[in-house]
Amino acid sequence: MSAVQLPKGVLADSFRQLRECGAGRAECVLYWCASQDNPDVVTRLVHPVHQAGARWYEVDSAWVTEFFLELRHIRETVRVQVHTHPFEAGHSGIDDRFALVPVAGFLSLVIPDYATGPVDLTGTALVRMGPDGEWRPVQPEEAFRVE
Amino acid sequence: MNTQHRETVTVTFNGIDKEVEYQPNAAVQALLNHAKHEFGAHNTPNNHLLSLFTEGGTELDDSMSATDAGVVPGMLLVLRQSTVKGGA
């Protein structure tokens, strides 16, 4: 499976957004989008309307519908879900069940320490949904080409 | 001979559209299952968490017939998780 191209600017902006929103005391979530014509090249991040606490987040239901309609209109797709955890990174049972796009190939990245650490993939946990619907660990350094 | 009347709606999921056939008098659940198949989401352990929504954001009742739920030929529906959330 080919690596997903992740611009350094999107990675840096993601950490900035996650830190500002979570403020070191709440989880936060965002989505890395790509063109439908070139889904392995991330082009932008989208920060959803959501509520969050120290160990949870929930995306606004109406926003999800509007977001999918927007993606359709501009011919984009969500390639990666990104969210923070308070301490170590890992994909929880809730993360497994309620991800935005539960289909094979979708990637979900968890960043530890509310994204207050280094602006890179160190310590992150990445999973990809397999054809059987199970989430399997993937090495972030292999799945992403940061450039 | 299959005499069931079939119509088509457009279902969008994560930005991508698929044309999905349905029977107006059959339950929305049947249309939902067809949509899940079209997007490859039918064999995931938690695919029961996916639902169909109107463009206005109203979730369709799976147990109603498509017609009674307000589905009309050619309309646009959104396939999505009923709830999107996470947590440590």
Image (cartoon, coloured by chain):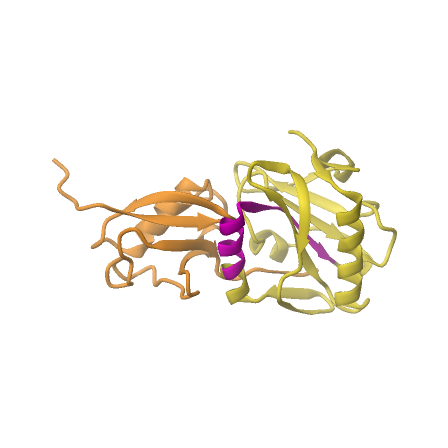
Chain colours: A yellow, B orange
Q: Residue furthest right?
A: A118
Residue B25 percent location from the top left of the image: 20, 55
Q: Quadrant of the N terminus of chain B?
A: top left
Residue furthest to the top? A1
Residue A112, x across and y down, in percent: 79, 55
Q: Quadrant of residue A84?
A: bottom right
Please say if A80 is above or below B60. Answer: above
Q: Position of residue B56 (x, y in %)?
A: 42, 65
| In magenta segment, residue A134 | no
Q: The C terminus of chain B is located in which quarter?
A: bottom right
Vertical placement of A54 versus A5: above or below?
A: below
Q: How many marks?
A: 0
Specify whether residue A86 is in view: no
Residue A137 seen from this side: yes
Query: Residue drawn at (53%, 51%), measured in percent from left and top?
Result: A71
Left or right: B70, with A18 as reference point: left
Please report the residue visible at 44 percent of the width from the left and 49 percent of the height from the top: B12
Q: Which residues are magenta?
A: A66-84
Name the spot of residue B73 as percent of width and height, x first. Answer: 26, 52
